[in-house]
Structures are given as C-alpha cells and as structure tokens.
Image: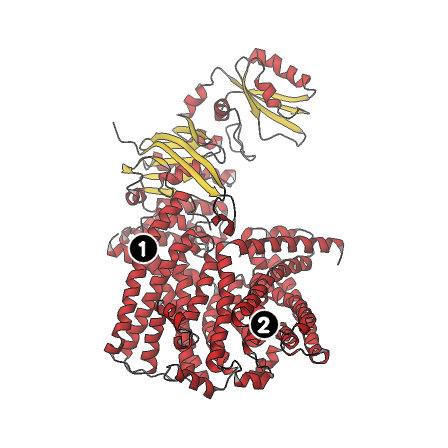
Amino acid sequence: MPTPAIEARDIRKEFYRRKERGWRRLLPGAPKEHTVALGGVSLTVNEGELFGLLGPNGAGKTTLVKILSTLLVPTSGGGTVAGHDLLKEGDAIRKKVGVVLGGERALYWRLTARENLRFFYELYNLPRAERQHRIDSLIDLVGLKDRADERVEGYSKGMKQRLHLARGLLHDPEILLLDEPSIGLDPGAARELRALVRGLTVKQGKTVVLTTHYLYEADVLSDRVGIISGGKLLTVDSPTALKARLADRSSVRLVTRGAPAGFEAVLAKLPGVTQAAVAPEAPAPDQQAFRVLVGDPDEAGRSLPLAVANAKASLLAMESHTPSLEDVFLELTGSTLTLGGNEVRSGEDE
Amino acid sequence: MSVTGFGRAAWASFIKSGKVAFTYSPWIINRVLGPFLWVSLAVYAYTGISTEANVQQRFHEVGVSGDFTTFLILGQTVFSFFTAMNWRSGFAIQRERWAGTWELILLSPVNRFAFLTGEALFGIVDSGWSVLLAMAVAAFAFGAGFTLGSPLLAFVALTLTLLAMVSLGFFFASFYVLSRSAGPLSMAIQAPVRFFSGTQFPVGALPAALQAVSYAIPITWGLGAVRATLTGEPTWSDLAPTLGLLVAFSVVFLTVGAILLKRMEHRSKVNGTVHLF
Amino acid sequence: MTTAAFRTFNGAFRLGFKNTLRGYTGTGWLVSTLLTPLFLVASAWVISRLVAPDGSPDRFTALTGITDYLTFVVIGFAFNGFLLSALDDGGSAVYDEQQAGTFELLAMSPMNPFAWMFGKTLASQVAAIIDLAIVIAVGGLLFGLQLTPTGLAWALLGLVLTLAALQGVAFVFAALGLGLKEPHALTVLMSPVFIFLSGMMFPVQALPGWVQVFSYSFPLTHGLDLVRGALLTGAGAEALLPSVWGLLVTGAVWITVGWVSFRALEKRARAKGTLGTY
C-alpha cells in the first residue's frame, strides 16, 4: 500500500489566551480563555490528490494547514507529511512542502516580484545555476511576466495571490498547502487561479491540499473533500459521493417576508423535512431566506407553505434543486456555510 | 544547513534589507544627518552649561586622558552602532512580522541565524558609513583629535565591539519574538545602556555601586577599547584582556541567544502567535 | 467650532486618547515609559555632578542666573513627551490610518479634517501628561527637584499654551508624513534638532546668536522659558509675558503652516490616487 502524502492522526489544538490586556495579564489568577480549534482530526491525503478542506470561517482549516506545514505545534496527536514525522522532522518537511497562506501581506512590497522570488530562492538554498530559469518559468506560469519587475506594492490582489503561488512552488515541492487561495478575488481571477492549481496535480503530479469556504471551488477542483466544522472533520469523500448521499433528498430554497426569528427551527420539525437553516443571502433586507432539505417532496410541498402562512408571513419564492455540497453541510451540521455573499448556487462563478 | 547555505541565506537577507531600506529615501537623509546631530547634542550637553576648560579638567580627574570632545564623539559613535544593531538585527524578526513574511521564513528550511546575520551585516554597513561620516564631521566641527597608534588594533577593537553588539542584538531578538511590545522594548533598552556604558560620561563618574552594572555590559568594554585605540597608543597586551572579554561576551550572548530563539520560536508555534505583532 | 466639527474633534480625541492609553498598558510601553525618564534625569544628574559638584555649573549659572541646573533640565525633560508626541504621533497621524486602511474612509467622509487632526494630535499630547508626571516624580523622589509653588498658575498656563502650539508642529509633521510616506524617519531626524534648539538640556543662550533665531521660532522654547521662569525663579508677569506672546505667535504660525501644507499635500494625494498608500 503506497504511503499517503499526508497522514494526520487525532490532531488536537487548544489555545489558552489571557483575557486581560497589558500588565494585568501578569497578575496571578488572571482569567484565561480556552478555545479548542481542532478537536481530534484524522485524515489521509493520497499522493497526487487534490484534497479540498471545506468549512466555514473559524472551522479550523487554517489551523490544520499550519500544523501540517510545521508552523503550529499540535496540543496532541501527530502524523506524517511527505513520509516525515510531523513533530520530529520539521526541517525535512519544510523542504518538501510549499505553503501558500496568501493575503495582502507576506510579500516585500518594496521589492519586485522577481526580487521577492530571488530572496526566497536563496533561503531554500536551491541550485544557483537554475535560479534564473526557475524564477522565469514560475513568473510565466502564474502570468506575471509583464509586471515581474514592478514593485509588489502596485499589484492587484489577484496578482499578489499569483505571486504567492509562485513563491510556494519555488522549491518544486511534492506537497502544496493552499489556504483559501481565491479569497477576495474577482470571478475571473479566481477561475484562472483554480486552473493553475488544477494543473499542478494533473500535469505535475503534485499533492495539493486546498482549504476553502467556496462550495464551487471544493466541488469542481477536489478529488476528495473533507468537511470541517467546529474543529471536527465531519466527513471525507469525493464531491460526487457526498452529493449522492442526498440522492433521495431535494434542496428547497424558501424566501419569505415577515417570518419570525428562529423560524428555521419550526421548518426543521415539519413533516417531510430533514434539516432547515437560515440561508445567508436574503434578496432584500426585509426578507428572509431558508435552505431546507426535504426527504418527502410531496409532504414538504404541503407543509412548507402552510407553516409560512401559520407564521403570518408571506411566501415569496420556493425553488427546488438537486442537493449540493451546501446541503451536505446542512445535513451534517444543521447550519449553512456563511459565505459572505459569495455563495454560488448554479455551479458557475457569478 | 551547510556553510554555503548559511552564507547564501545571510547574503540574501543582506541584499533584501538593503534594497528595502534604500527605497525609503527619508531614511537616507536621516542616516547622513542623524548621527552628527546626536554627537552635537552630546557635546553641547556639557559645553552649554560649563566652560570647556572646566569640563576638560573634570574629565581628567575621573581618569579620562585626551580631549573630552573626542571622548564624547567616540561614545556617541559606538552607541550609534549599538542602536543600529538593536533596531536592525534585534528588531529584524519584528519587522518581518509587520510585513507578514516571518511565517514564510519559518516555513523555509533556512537557519534563523543566517537570516539574522544578514540583517546584522547590513546594519553594520548601513550605520557604519553614516556613523563614520558623522565622526569625521564632528571631529572637524568641534576640533577633536584622534591618535591612531595601531590601525590593526583599532580595527580589531571595533570589530570585536561590533560582534558583541550583534550578539546582544540576537539575544534581544528572541524576547522581541514573544513580545507584542517589541518597539517599546527596543526603546526601553537604549536608555539604560546609554547611561551605563560610558557613552555620555566616564563610567568613573558613576557611584561605585553602579559601576558594577556598567562593567557587565559588553558595550562598556568595547567603547573603552575603541577609545583607547583612537586616542592613545595602547599595545596588544594592554588590550588583550578587554578584547578577550568581548569575545567571551559575544560567545555567551550568541549561544544564549541561539537557545532562546529556538525556544521562543517553539513557544510561538505552540501558542499560535507566530503571525501576531 | 460648529457642532459637526466638534463631534469630529470629540470622536477623534476619544479614539486617539483611548488608543494611546491602551499603549501605555502594554508591557513594553510601561517599561519604556518608566525607564526612559529615569535614565534621562539620572544622566543629567551625573553630568551636573561631574562638571559642578556643588550642582551649579558655571556657564549655566552665568547665562541664566539659575543655580539649580538639575531642576532646569528636569522641566525640560518633562516636556520631552509632548515634543515626541507632536513629532511621532503627529507624523504618524495619517500614516497609521493608511496602514489600518482607514484613511481613505476618513477622506471620503464629510468630516472637518482640521477638527479630526486637532482631536487626534491633542489626544496623544494629553496622554503625554503621564510622561510629564513620571519625570517630575522621578526628579522629585530621587533627585531632589525643587520647584517654586508660587509660579504654578503661570506654569500651567505655559503647559496649556505649549500643548496648543505644538499642535502646529504635529500638523506640519502629519503633512510631511502624508507627503513623504515615511514619517518615522523625519521624527528620528528632527527629534535631536528640536531638543537642541528648544533648550531642553542646556540654556538656549549657550547657542550662537544666529542659531537662537531658529530656537525662538519653535514654540517649545518659549514654553520652557515660561515654565522655568515661573517655577525656578518665581518671575512675575512682566518677565513672563514675552514668553506667552512668543507661544501665541509661534503657535499660530506653525498651526497655519501645518494646516496649509496638510491641505496642499492631501490635494496632491487625491490627484495622484495615493491617499491609501504608505
């Protein structure tokens, strides 16, 4: 049996932060806040696989990526990355793993893209003779050729993100960890980035772990998806298999006006309904949107409008569609992913 | 990490620091004028309140041979190197945290000391030219004189003093990693070091009990050695104990700094504070 | 000041004051705030004992008629915090907002920018009263500071007028920060210049005549003259009024220059699209 590229075994991460600020923190008995960021996560990622880690903000995705990259030490648990022990062989892991944390920072703004890459190339002690060629190839790959000699401070968000990717690939790592790589990008830039990422596994055989809270991204890119919420890995399977679990269900989107607070709890108890939650993107401020998983469409078709009427609310829309990963998440957790207005429903970038 | 790898990383860090630093043109003006201004302040702190003859006599009474303006110019010069090291290598990690690049550096296999070495080297070069320029201008402006008995001895004294300061910078760097008050801590250290190191006045002017603190600071010894080589004609055997002490200080602070840095890095990874500043 | 402008001033002042005070509770700031004045005053004490064991340096006494050099210097250092606030916090007023990404939002709002600047810079100046208190405490408790209580009213007037006048310095440095994008370099450069010119560590009269012209164009010089005159010599109105006028005139000039340059550089930044860059 081939060794998995990544194997995480019961990884747990807890944080204790002092609530007080400044010198008060040093006082004896100063209260501490205890947070469990990861509550025992185990997973394996196979070589050459593109593994998507899907979950809402605060689920523990970044924490897990940072642990796998050796940037964070787990409270308990362990594993292997590229065949090396996670806790004892950090140096070896860092040579084989590329990490893209992204964001506006994490680059030297006053240097050009080429100068940034050159600096990191030297830190990795890579072959001098190949430096020029390697940097040029990566700049080409990420589409920054025309702007490579301009200072990063003038780059758009998308360009910075692409430069992050180039930097993560400098040392030709076996494994690439991407933390929300398309966050904040416009649909076109996000599409380009995804194509690049896909090419890394398909053409170069790299193993990629990608964290995201974008359903579409997880759905179209990933060979397998792990759904994480509240520090726990809820399930792992291919997107197709995950959606197939809900083959006997439908997903209904309800839009109402005047529905009372907590109405989703009422909906969840209706005959024919298996799960219900507030959907984050109501069309107007005075309207409410709900996402409902339905096991018996006929029964739900009767009970849902009735419930709205009983609540003295107006039913503005009721649409049914085949379940998506969002519905899988709903089924598992009883809530929707909060997507900040970026939810994609139709399977296309908006 | 191999020696070649260490060297490459240090050189890359040196070049990167240089390129970033010289994009900020106001800082270049600062480097040209700043050291001279502080030297002038140091001299006027005395000549503004007392006659030169009186100050000269009082300096001689506490064991200073040579001109008091030379004493002050050299004090401020060496102290300027210390502040440069404090802000350059001591503060290097904090700067990277501000830029958001510290995590990336930790994610690479680079030796952390290689990175800090490059920063320190740049600090020496960057501050060196401006400090020496200030020294020359101040000497001209205030009529101070230097006596260079043995250029090699002076070079060694200055080099070992710089090495001691670099090691001190590395030592402080680890505290700055864990602290979210790196800037204020950097500033806080400068005041007592300036006071105790003999920068502004001879150590002999301090009460005896406080002089013990002075001699626990490597800069005091380094400053003494630099002053001796630039205002007199000491022999190698005269300065051997001081130079040896500077080497010992450097070894101790570098070693402790390396251990602390590793521990602080691990602690920041356990606490999840690597990226915070 | 209109209601809207007052609300802007009040909001900026409260936020600035809160942020500055919060900084003081950080361990590093606390250590720095306590250590720096202690060693500043201690250095002056050592220097004074070195050149004049009786505490009365010859040239100093001849120039000022004052025998207590240490108290003279302690008063100077007590105002150091105000100077640094004007330079550093004034210079960073815009820069910090740009780093936080909020300056563009402020620039897009209908707020009165003068009121905003005034509130922000006054906040850090008022917080710097903590530095003043620490210096006076260190001087009094450890080094035998001696002040004439009869001059307290004039000293307080000097403090208030100096704070107001230093707003102009803060405005100038805020403008320079907006224009040059690197305010700290300026602060680090000009700090020794103003310490030198203002007579913080030695009497201005010790400087060459042509340099004193620059000294007396700086508000802090007049402020220190006023406060020292009141507390060290018990001087009356006739001796102190020139310093009051000096503060008012230099303050007005600096505020005007600062305001005009800030507006000009802001206009330029709007034209070039660099309001948010730093």
Q: Which residue is mark 1?
A: B258
> Callout 2: 10 Å neighbours few (<14), some, many (20+)?
many
User: Looking at the picture, which amino acid does disc 2 mark?
Assistant: Ile
> Callout 1: 10 Å neighbours few (<14), some, many (20+)?
some
Residue C276 visible in this rendered orientation of the protein: no
**Front residue of this view, candidates C71 and B101:** C71
Chain on which label 1 sits? B
Residue A57 in the image: state x and y as whole percent. 50, 35
Q: Nearer the viewer, mark 2 or mark 1?
A: 2
Toward which corner of the image does residue A11 lie, by quadrant?
top left
Residue A78 in the image: state x and y as whole percent. 33, 35
User: Looking at the picture, which amino acid does disc 1 mark?
Assistant: Ala
**Front residue of this view, candidates C226 and B13:** C226
Q: CA distance from mark 2 to mark 1?
A: 43 Å
Toward which corner of the image does residue A142 lie, by quadrant?
top left
The outermost residue toward the top is A298
Asked if A112 appears above or below A171 in the picture, the reply is below
Q: Which residue is mark 2?
A: C75
Q: Secondary structure at mark 2?
A: helix
Q: In the shown orientation, is residue A143 left or right of residue A275? A: left
Residue A18 in the image: state x and y as whole percent. 48, 44
Asked if C276 appears above or below A275 in the picture, the reply is below
Q: Residue placed at 62% from the left, 23% from the top?
A: A263
The outermost residue toward the bottom is B53
User: How has the structure been colored for display?
Assistant: secondary structure
**Front residue of this view, candidates C223 and C113:** C223
Residue C131 in the image: state x and y as whole percent. 56, 63
Asked if C176 appears above or below A134 in the picture, the reply is below
Q: Secondary structure at mark 1?
A: helix
